[in-house]
Amino acid sequence: MKEISDREQLNHYLHAHQIESVFNEQVLPHLALYSFKQGEIICSQGESAQYLYLLVKGKVKIYTTSMEGRTLILSFKTPLEAIGDIEYVRGTDILNTVEAVSPVHLIGVHHRWLKKYGRDHAPFLQFLLEIITRKFYIKSNSLSFNLMYPVEVRLASYLLSVSYDESNSLFKGQLSTVSLRDVANLIGTSYRHLNRVIRQFCTEGLIERNKGFILVKDRAGLSALTSHNIYE
């Protein structure tokens, strides 16, 4: 994580996403702009929640980990998205792990300033209400997706999400083969079955497996397979 000391850029993001009115005048001076590199963890499940973040550029991956160590992907998010909103409202530890899929920019504010100045600011409370209700709706669907859709669709959706970022045309993500066991856990299948589907995709010309990474060759083909991206 790196703090970007550029107030003009921060104000640009506030204006671009039409959220200038979300924070009142007392909170605005305490907003900060942060950058995270691809693969960097923004927050980890079970840690103490101290900041509310707004994703204003890039893409993040959200997943949960069971007590047995198994992980399950919940969704991918692009701007505008809040991170840590539920934890702020409920005063709980971080619910899920959030990881940067591409280089990302986040606007962050410490909970203490929101509690001091934001509790009675109606636009901020309305913003939280809209964000949180949308999240619960999406989460209720995402858990069933992993049960309803075959592994081919889940893997195709995952590859589409990690290999492209609409907000950053220079980002060309590649999936490291070192992380395939994690991918199997994330999409809810076995490592053996995942490898079978990967070989199938290679035969069909959808992807290419080289030493150390997997490259998406036919995005249109993967998109046709999924009909819509179940993780976004």
Image (cartoon, grey):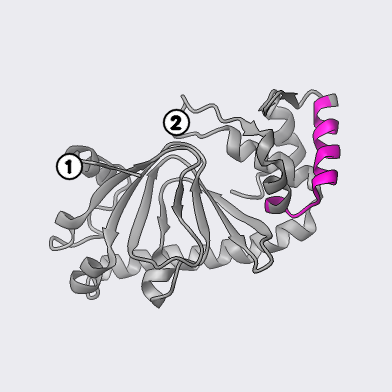
Q: Is residue 206 left or right of residue 87?
A: right
Provide residue 83's location: percent of width, then percent of height.
42, 58
Q: Nearer the viewer, residue 88 or 180?
A: 180
The secondary element bearing badge 1 is classed as helix
Looking at the rendering, the stretch of residues picked out in magenta corresponds to 186-202
| Magenta span contains residue 200 | yes
Please give the count of numbered marks on the rendered protein: 2
- Relative to 209, is 120 above or below? below
Q: Earlier in the sequence, mark 1 or mark 2?
A: 1
Left/right of residue 18 with respect to residue 211 in the rendered view: left
Q: Is residue 129 visible?
A: no
**Chief SS of the magenta region:** helix
Residue occupying image coordinates x 38% and y 76%: 91
The label shown at residue 110 is: none
Residue ID for mark 2:
168
* Image coords of residue 108 (percent x, y): 30, 54
Q: Residue at x 53, y 62 (%)?
A: 96
Could you tell me if residue 192 is visible in this image?
yes
**What residue is pinned by disc 1?**
7
Query: For the N terminus, which image quadrant?
Result: top left
Residue at 23 percent of width and 57 percent of height: 21
Q: Position of residue 142 (x, y in %)?
A: 65, 59
Q: Is residue 182 above or below residue 92?
A: above
Crowding around mark 1 (Cα neighbors within 10 Å: few <14, some 14 to 19, many 20+) is few
User: Residue 206 occupies which quadrant of the picture?
Assistant: top right
**Type of the residue with mark 1:** Arg
Q: Residue 153's image quarter?
A: top right
Residue 4: say if magenta: no
Label 1, label 2: how far apart the Cα atoms are? 21 Å
